[in-house]
Each structure stands twice: as C-alpha cells, then as structure tokens.
Amino acid sequence: MSRRREPVPFAFLAETDSFRSNVTAPPRERASTAQLAARWLMGLTIVGGLVGALVIGTPSMSHQSPAATQHSEASDGR
C-alpha cells in the first residue's frame, strides 16, 4: 500500500499573524452593590482568619530554653 502525498498549503499560517477580527467582545457587566459587598466581606473573612491563626499560633511556636522551665522540689527530693 502506498501513501498518496499531496501538497498541504501552509500559507494560511503566515496570514494569521496579520489577521484582525472585526468581532468585539460584549462589554462586561458591572458588579452590583451586593456583589461588591460580598467580595469585600469574603476578603475580610479570609484576612481575619489568617490574622487570627497567626495570633493564636504565635505563642505555641515560641521557643523556650530548658533553663526557663521550672522544676518542682518534689521531683528533686533526696
């Protein structure tokens, strides 16, 4: 079985660089006041959660030196 080789015109690839569409996208709809308020509220909730996690987590991440820990006298008892 032999394949037929036909020339493929690739001239259209060179023309695509200069092609400009005359179709314009429709204008974007403006967000309503409720949508803007919801976006702000969501942003504030996320930022508040991150700040809260940082405030709560910071004391647990602080490093205490072994000398700063207190020993009870009962455990030292001889």
Image: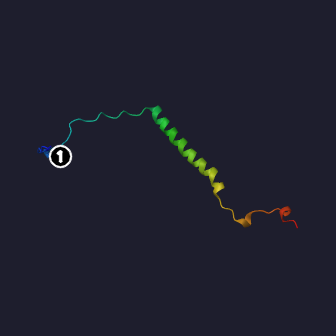
When asked about the image quadrant of residue 30, the answer is top left
- Where residue 13 appears, as percent x and y from the top left, is 17, 46
Decide if residue 61 is on the left or right side of residue 5. right
Could you say which is closer to the camera, residue 3 or residue 76?
Answer: 3
Is the C terminus in the top left, top right, bottom left or bottom right quadrant?
bottom right
Would you name the residue on which mark 1 appears?
Answer: 13
The secondary structure type at the circle numbered 1 is helix
At x 63% / y 52%, what residue is drawn? 57
Residue ID at (64%, 50%): 56
Three-letter amino acid code of the residue under disc 1 = Leu
Residue at 49% in and 39% down: 40
Considering only vertical position in the picture, is 43 above or below 66?
above
Q: State the quadrant of the N terminus.
A: top left
Q: Residue at x 57, y 45 (%)?
A: 49
The percent position of residue 34, horizontal first and vertical second, equals 47, 32
Viewer-proximal residue among 70 and 49 = 70
